[in-house]
Image (spheres, helix red, strand yellow):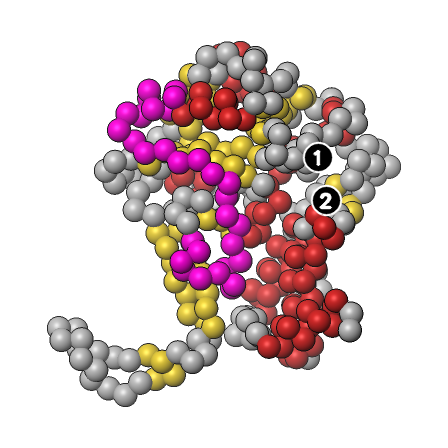
Amino acid sequence: MTVSDKWRQDYRQDRYLEQVSPDEIEQRVRDIFTNVLVLSEDGKLSLPAMEKGTGYWMQLFTHVLEEFALRKQWVRPGFLKDNPMPIPTWPEMPRAAQAVSGRVFEPGKFLFKFGKQEHLRSTLENGTIRLAPASSYSDPSLNYAIRDDELHFTVQMPAKDTWIQKVDEKTLNPVAGKIKALGNISFTQTVPSDYYVYCLSGLFTFRAFDDFQADACLVIKQPKQFIEQVLFAGFAKLPNWFARVGAVDYLDPLRTSREDVRAFFAKHFRYSYQNELRIVWVPENRQQNLQPVFIETGPLHEIAEEIIVLPSE
């Protein structure tokens, strides 16, 4: 039995896409393509090795193929149009590859901040860092890679073996017969307050410059010391707030339980390729519609390298 056949067999035992609409399945395929393709050093779209995470996405894609086979359906023509994926540059080398001149950053040893050169220069020279309200990321003017609802996360669970029981509002006693639930049941977790977030990436990728509309990248060579300085400066600006640091959990809303959703760190799996680490500040009392604030850590030359700048087009 091939790996693909095993994946198809496993899916038939847990057909979690059965009640998902064609539109949602097509979006799922777009999300898979967004994550599985990378931009190579020669400017081509390529697939990483299976051991580098490609296997996970190929398994999900195989599940989609099996669901379509069971439905005797297929995706509609043009459904991948304008899908956010790495932008190929072949036969030209990507400008990001030119900027690093073949240097490879060992995973887990560095943090990266992609942005505008002028802002990153201020961060390196003065330690000036902008903390953004989580609510600001839902701005519809932001691009696909940045825009997200950071205050809510929804999971969907198959309704099989689930029954709906109407009860008396006061006594909670049953007042009618049970009704079998159909489709999927959605649960949305909402964080109780707006909060501040500072986002970094744990991986240097060529596509990140396009995704974040960046022309530069600050390489942080001592992540632990950097985070400590950012936390110290943040508490100076936001006394009595709570801070948390951690890698983002990229969750598949169709295969995640409510207990797995970690407040402030849960994101849809369509953003997995961003490899985000974040620092969040949560107010002691509930607040809404926060405004950006700036903090100052002081010069960062000892813990951050010179900024990588894209060459001119």
Label 1 Cα crowd, 10 Å radius (few <14 / some 14-19 / many 20+)? many
Q: Which image quarter holds the N terminus?
A: bottom right
Q: Is residue 256 magenta?
A: yes
Image height check: is 209 above or below 256? above
Where disc 2 sits, the SS reads strand
Residue holding disc 2: 38
Image height check: is 54 above or below 275? below
Image height check: is 108 above or below 121? below
For the residue pair 99 and 138, the one nearer the viewer reads as 99
Image height check: is 220 above or below 56? above
Q: Would residue 233 be found to the left or right of residue 63 on screen? A: left
The image shows residue 121 at horizontal and vertical percentages of 56, 16
In the rendered structure, are the residues bearing label 2 and label 1 in contact, judged by CB atoms less than 8 Å apart?
A: yes
Where disc 1 sits, the SS reads loop
Q: Would residue 33 be found to the left or right of residue 102 on screen? A: left
Q: Is residue 176 visible?
A: yes
Residue holding disc 1: 206
Farthest right residue in view: 91
The image shows residue 80 at horizontal and vertical percentages of 68, 57
Q: What residue type is labelled 1?
A: Phe
Q: Can residue 142 be seen in this view?
A: no
Read off the magenta span.
232-261
Q: Residue at x 62, y 30 (%)?
A: 109
Q: Which residue is drawn at 61% across and 55% down?
A: 31
Q: Is residue 304 magenta?
A: no
The image shows residue 230 at horizontal and vertical percentages of 44, 23
